[in-house]
Amino acid sequence: MSKPQPPLLSMQPLEAPLTTSVQSRMQELILAGLVAWSGHNLAPMAPVAQTRGNRTVAELLLEDRE
């Protein structure tokens, strides 16, 4: 008879929830000086990158997946 093997995976509940509110995380980033917002919406911008030829980026990505 072979010796029983230990389980490869054991799922257990976390001790503390990992959820933090988006608001509290944004507040941490603001206090750290990593983000700033004037309260105004961003103005639309023209795309910076352009593809060569007439094909779209989506078409190039789909071709690369094949």
Image: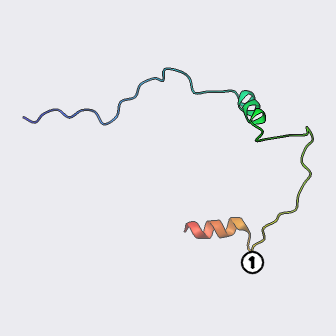
Question: What amino acid is found at the position of numbered circle 1 in the picture?
Answer: Arg
Residue 61 to residue 53: above or below: above
**Residue at x 91% of width, y 37% of height:** 39
Residue 28, picture quadrant: top right
Q: Quadrant of the C terminus?
A: bottom right
Residue 30 in the image, given as x and y percentages of width and height: 78, 35
- Mark 1 burial class by Cα count in 10 Å: few <14, some 14-19, many 20+: few
Residue 56, picture quadrant: bottom right
Residue 51 to residue 58: above or below: below
- Name the residue nearer the viewer: 15 or 59: 15
Residue 55 to residue 4: above or below: below
As drawn, is 37 to the left or to the right of 52?
A: right
Residue identifier under label 1:
52
- Name the residue nearer the viewer: 40 or 64: 40
**Residue at x 83% of width, y 63% of height:** 47
As drawn, is 40 to the left or to the right of 30?
A: right
Display colour scheme: rainbow
**Residue at x 6% of width, y 34% of height:** 1
- Name the residue nearer the viewer: 36 or 6: 36
**Residue, far left:** 1
Residue 43 in the image, given as x and y percentages of width and height: 92, 51
